Amino acid sequence: MSGPVLRVRDLITTFGQGAQALCAVDGVSFDVGPGEVLGLVGESGSGKSVTLRSLLRLLPAGGHVAGRVEWQGRDVLAMSEAELRGVRGGQISMIFQEPMTALNPVLPVRVQIEENLRAHTDLDGRGRRARSRELMDLVGIPDAGRRLDEYPHQFSGGMRQRVMIAIALASDPKLLLADEPTTALDVTIQDQILHLILDLRDALAMSVVFVTHDLGVVSATCDRMAVMYAGRIVEEGAVRDVFAGPRHAYTRGLLGSIPQAGAERSMLLSIEGTPPGLAAIPPGCAFNPRCDFATEICRAVRPDLAEMAPVHRAACHNAEAVAAAGSPVRSALADG
Amino acid sequence: MVEALLSAEDVSKDFAFPRSVVDLLRRRHVTAVHALNGVSLDVRRGETLGIVGESGCGKSTLARCLVRLHDCDRGRVVFDGTDIATLRGAARRRFNARVQMIFQDPYSSLNPRMSVRQILSEALRVHRMRPAGEIDGRIAELLEMVRLPADAADRHPHAFSGGQRQRIGIARALAVEPEVLVADELVSALDVSVQAQVVNLLLELQDRLDLTIVFVAHDLRLVRHISHRVAVMYLGKVVEVAPTEALFTDPRHPYTQALLAAAPEIDPGRRSRRAGARGELPSPIDLPPGCLFHTRCPHAFDRCPRDVPELGPRGPGHAAACHLDAPAPRP
């Protein structure tokens, strides 16, 4: 396997100044390989969306990013605005959770797709028109010729998400960043969009970073996953390995919170309490007040991500105890 | 056969669009969203009935009709032998106390200006559940029941997280000692780990208080976990109803099959690269003729756009509305 296309090192994102500053992403490092789908999982407030936006410096005013984001050997965080424009929306595209707010409601979708083509390709007007029609076909919008002249409100939720993907693909990106792209959609439409993203990944040899809170989506689509809690990655590994043998108590709790077939009406393995606010992250391991495995050291020392098995890392002092407790997910793999 | 405690009999509900003067002059037809199109469903005493479907299938409208937050246009809802549309005055208040609803959004369903104590004592006073002297004791009991700290009573809703607010909603519903709880997307606004806490609480309360629960949700895994029976809705109709195990292992309606196939597997070992259903939901304003699902159905044949299929028996307690007895699910 060749080297990673994206290397993120010690990413730190803060909002606000001085003593009031809140740290939303606290030292996150990960790689994305060529053609790989990486899932970034966590609950609300865990910093997963901010991490994704920080990669392209797409932060609201007051946000500040530090660390390194290496894209094809260059640091995105150190680029000039002009250089960044070539990468953002060009080599790296992004799709968002709410397609109605991400699309411009007063422009027909043709204009919105061609806008990206104009910025990132040297096609002429005729070429752009043909290409935008191809893109609409590619993402599975029927009757593309007519629908190009319609406005976003004339599309259903699933079709709007397809339009957004068409815009993202216009520049032939090498990396697609997807921020909860299916959360607002119904399950049959979610299924269609997930399959579309996977098919496009295969056809266009893209890498994908997928932010989601839904472990079902991760299980169905991602190759590797990174679990975030309170702004840090607490566990990272191949999806199969993490589901089969979580090494961090939080990952284990998340997996146990999902109802499974065959255990109807039993008590779920829930996690007591709620995730901490950014202003009150507990000392030591941020998860320790909610953790069943917590010991003295967890309250005092923050654990670092450590290699537990080949390409499986976890930040837990009691990883062995968690591993011994086993996975709450019953897998067809384990049954043979 | 266990008696039905609450049943919908051929319930329909339309929401008409307002007509402008121009519409009247041009004699345009009244356009309406057909939210429910003849729903018949029994809820039995002591069971949890899950109602699933995608957005726009009418599941929330049905929930609201069951507690009479909407009056139905056609058909009727019967509770304990009485048509609830005929209830007046004290009898209606009595019904409201016996059948309670918990809402989806924990942020908009609690009055932000009232403390938890005020919210709960309002319910207790309106229904004269306890004499004034015993109200504080009952509030403490209710908070303990939903696992909130005793000092929660004097705080306002903004001081609580989403999961805690849903507990307050549950406490408010339980304050009037209902027999039936109608929960509309009770946990869908909550994070996964918090969802599990609330689901555990609901299961425990049901055992302790002998509650009958109507659990409306779009999350199939969740509905499978807590329901005894499940009804699947599509465009304002029940297309299949069955005991939970039968519905999930042997679905007989092509829509149920598509829905189950579309839900992502939690087991990475069973990944599929095929989409479960094609196409999207037709508009509830212009419903397709015949079987409502025929526009998306892989098994549709010439009879489907013509005849409306009725719910027919498929096994013990299992009924499906399809012209085919056992359409083969796609591999």
Image (cartoon, coloured by chain):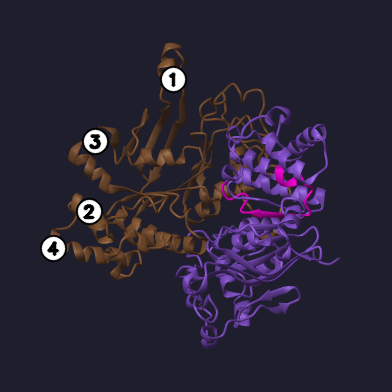
Chain colours: A purple, B brown
Q: CA distance from mark 4 to mark 1?
A: 54 Å
> Of discs 4 and 1, which sits in the foreground?
1
Q: Residues within 10 Å of mark 1 (few under 14, many from 20)?
A: few
Q: Residues within 10 Å of mark 2 (few under 14, many from 20)?
A: some
| Amino acid type assigned to the residue bearing label 3 in the image | Leu
The residue tagged with tag 2: helix, strand or loop?
A: helix
Residue in the image at 81% along x and 44% along y: A121
Residue in the image at 66% along x and 78% along y: A305
Magenta stretch: give its range: A167-184
Whether residue B88 appears in this view of the structure is yes
| Amino acid type assigned to the residue bearing label 2 in the image | Glu
- Asked if badge 2 and badge 1 are on a common chain, one would say yes
Does residue A177 belong to the magenta stretch?
A: yes
The residue tagged with tag 4: helix, strand or loop?
A: helix
Location of the N terminus of chain B (image quadrant): top left
Specify the subunit that label 2 lies on. Answer: B
Which residue ends up furthest to the right in the rendered image? A2
Specify the subunit that label 4 lies on. Answer: B
Label located before the other in sequence (2 or 3): 3
Pick the front one: A232 or A273: A232
* Marks 4 & 1, CB-CB < 8 Å contact: no
Residue in the image at 55% along x and 79% along y: A285
Label 4 sits on residue: B133
Label 2 sits on residue: B122
Label 1 sits on residue: B30
Q: CA distance from mark 2 to mark 3?
A: 22 Å
Whether residue A336 appears in this view of the structure is no
